[in-house]
Amino acid sequence: MNILIVGSGGREHAIALSVSKSPRAEKIYCAPGNAGISAVAECVPIGAMEFEKLVSFAKEKAIDLVIVGMDDPLVGGLVDELEAEGIRTFGPRKNAAILEGSKAFSKDLMKKYGIPTAAYETFDDAEKALEYLKTADFPIVLKADGLALGKGVLICNTLKEAQDGVKTIMEDKKFGDAGNRMVIEEFMTGREVSVLSFVDGKTIKIMSSAQDHKRAGDGDTGLNTGGMGTFSPSPFYTKEIDEYCREHIYQATVDAMAKEGRPFKGVIFFGLMLTEKGPKVLEYNARFGDPEAQVVLPRMKNDILEVMEACIEGKLDEVDLAFEDNAAVCVILASEGYPLHYEKGFAVSGLERFEKEQGSRDAEEGYYCFHAGTKFDENGTLVTNGGRVLGVTAKGPDLKQARENAYKATEWVQFENKYMRHDIGNTIIDL
């Protein structure tokens, strides 16, 4: 099979590595890809939102399967454009990707079908939002309705903070058009868990649980980011919670989308809050999470291409999804100053150790280095090219050993202005 992966981050590198393990993958392309992805795929200089060029490329190279990794092209309708030209594509169509593309839509869907989530109100007028806040309980959560690179969520402890938040989202448009509409939501407390799933329109198969760390600084301080590290599985995602979610959240969401005439095929990411009153949905994503994919996919036993084709063909019920009985931890190596201002173009060294380790995927303790913000400069030197640069992932027999391995592996990598959190999983794994 000739495969085209659309995207350029750590998620797409994790997907590309999984695809490369399939005996059915003959040639892999990635648009636009990055320096790390180029080790397992041919990177082509086409942006993820250049739909016409992507369709033309897929035709020219006789692509058998396109895998869309990023949210923007999914919400923008890339799957529809490819399928209209007879090109098999893994990912939800535009009318289903709205599950992530509009928080107002997803909240309304959950309310209509009784899927547990936080109480909320939706606003497209800043003045009305400010008026509502005068009667609200704090803390409270403000969410830009559209896509905002995982950063369009503000937790406000006081009325003043919330008023400033409305200005930031709806008036200053810090998150662009994503802030034309806003959801104001009840603040929930509990443990957060991320659960990825494969969906074929009617059947849903759950992957291993994970937990992300969004804040930039140790101790969950600083600004929200796209994710500073993650681990899998979550010790708080028990058998009882899994059974509840399968009945009241997972299948209910798939059925709701089908009833709305928006059958979902692809990956649904469930962001859950384990509250005192039971699990509730924080958010949906319409694709693999990043960095969650970097700890979940290395533990998956299945041929990823077989699973994706089953989703496209509506045969997911025939797949026995299986994961290794171990754990994985990912630590993001970022550029100092991320997510605000940071410098790029610094040489990266020390990755040879990962290339040696990656030869044995079935080893209990594997090491991976997923590239997010890297490129080769004009001299062929690997340099930093983003805020999140690399995702260093290690497996182990349990979370404690996986974390120890991951932090050991971060020492192998060097670049100027290297920054990371030093407490990924600490408060959970040491319990």
Image (spheres, rainbow, N blue to C red):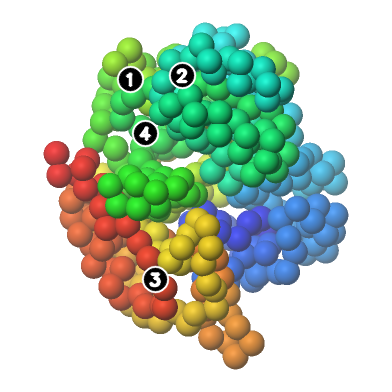
The earlier-in-sequence mark between 4 and 1 is: 4
Residue 270 appears left or right of 309: left
Dot label at residue 119: none
Amino acid at pointer 3:
Lys
Amino acid at pointer 2:
Glu
What percent of the width, then of the height, locates residue 128? 67, 17
**Along the viewing direction, whichever of 36 and 361 lies nearer the viewer:** 36
Point 61% across, 21% down: residue: 130
Packing grade of label 4 (10 A; few <14, some 14-19, many >=20) is many
Asked if 418 appears above or below 25 in the picture, the reply is below
Packing grade of label 3 (10 A; few <14, some 14-19, many >=20) is some
- Mark 2 highlights which residue? 186
**Distance from the alpha carbon under mark 1 to that under mark 3:** 36 Å
**Distance from the alpha carbon under mark 3 to that under mark 2:** 36 Å
**Distance from the alpha carbon under mark 4 to that under mark 3:** 28 Å
Point 62% across, 34% down: residue: 167
**Along the viewing direction, whichever of 314 and 258 lies nearer the viewer:** 258
Residue 42 appears left or right of 324: right
Asked if 348 appears above or below 373 in the picture, the reply is below
- Mark 1 highlights which residue? 275
- Mark 3 highlights which residue? 418
Contact between labelled residues 3 and 1, with CB atoms less than 8 Å apart: no
Please name which of the two marks, 4 or 3, marks the residue nearer to the observer: 3
What percent of the width, then of the height, locates residue 391? 41, 61
Please name which of the two marks, 1 or 3, marks the residue nearer to the observer: 3
Q: Could you tell me if residue 265 is visible in this image?
A: no
Q: Residue furthest bottom?
A: 379
What percent of the width, then of the height, locates residue 125? 71, 22
